[in-house]
Amino acid sequence: MEARRILNCTRSPENEYHRVVGVCFDIEAKDNSIAILGFSAGTYKRDGFVQLYTKAGSCVGSEGRPSQWTGIWSGRAHGQKSSNVVLESGVDMAPQGTRGFYFHGGNAGICLALPDESSENDDLRITRGSLSDNGTAFHLSASDPIAHTMYSHAGQVWYTMATIDKLLRQYSVLLLKALAGLVRLCLEDVLNFLVLSRVLVKYWNDFGPGMRAFTIMSLAAGILCSGAGPLKDLWGVRKVCMNTPTALLVPFPFELHKVALFSVVVGAFVLQALPGLVFLIRKKYLAAAVRFNEFNFLLGMLECEASD
């Protein structure tokens, strides 16, 4: 793994310019993909509890909107002494990308760097800033006369460059996922679509209007849902090829595996499989039972036989 790189702010906590309850600022990547690994920061005169938040894009306009921010670290910092803020997982940034960061130190305060002096090197720059003297997080005012100056925390920014190995791993994973999704789409959903479409056309006059509409919507929804995953992964492959470490960022309050687990347990098992089994055992509502168990072809044949 590439060695950690450091961007020094204009002041350190041991030689801070001033203190404030909270400060948010932007970090802009220049021409390379980078990952923010952590910071060094300090509180004013005494130890205190510090929280760190981040958001995609600039902090400007989001100073007082906590729903747009994600907490990435919390812990104690030392008074007027550099404290390590080590992130469990790096915050990826694309070339020319911007992320907002917000340090909140409560009553202990955060040590500030010099105002109106940008900190930058060949890879990063720190720009913009808003201050708050309110003890509650996110009580930042964009209309404050000191808002959007070059304030930032006093300390350092730790980062590393996106390595070729990391990009290759991301490329391989996304490509394999896309290929697996395309195989499933072609061998299962497209084949099912063709078979059921042929049945629908053949028995069009025998099916009722409700059955026709339901089958068409079911086929369309199946193709769209199955094709969305491979398309997203292929888009991610394209982004990686353009040297972007993060393929596609969509803010979402839950982790992906939890969403998938909920969909399988509640959607497929509780709301589909169990009712279908109950209907089959009781031999009632057989049409619904067959549909719940994905036997679309059998459902169509049952209706044809009933019409005969």
Image: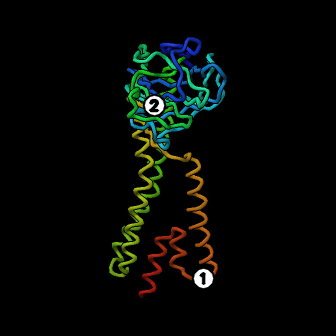
Of 100 and 148, nearer the camera is 148
Q: Residues within 10 Å of mark 2 (few under 14, many from 20)?
A: many
For the view shown, which residue lies furthest in the bottom direction?
Answer: 308
SS class, disc 2: strand
Residue at 40% from the left image edge and 28% from the top image edge:
147
Does residue 107 appear in this view? yes
Report the residue marked by disc 1.
283
Which circle, 1 or 2, is nearer the viewer? 2
In the image, residue 45 sits, relative to residue 261, either above or below, namely: above
Relative to 174, 47 lies left or right: right
Residue at coordinates 43% horizontally, 13% vertically from top-left?
121
* Residue at image coords 33%, 72%: 201
State the SS at label 1.
Answer: loop
Asked if residue 147 lies left or right of residue 260, the reply is left
Q: Position of residue 99 (x, y in %)?
A: 44, 30
- Residue under label 2, please give it: 100
Q: Position of residue 254 (x, y in %)?
A: 55, 47
Q: Quadrant of residue 209?
A: bottom left
For the N terminus, the image quarter is top right
- Categorize mark 1 by other alpha carbons within 10 Å: few (<14), some (14-19), many (20+): few
Q: CA distance from mark 1 to mark 2?
A: 60 Å
Quarter placement of the C terminus: bottom left
Q: Is residue 284 above or below residue 168?
A: below
* Amino acid of disc 2: Gly
Q: Residue 76 in the image: state x and y as whole percent.
A: 66, 27
Return the residue nearer the eye: 209 or 98: 98
Q: Residue furthest top?
A: 15
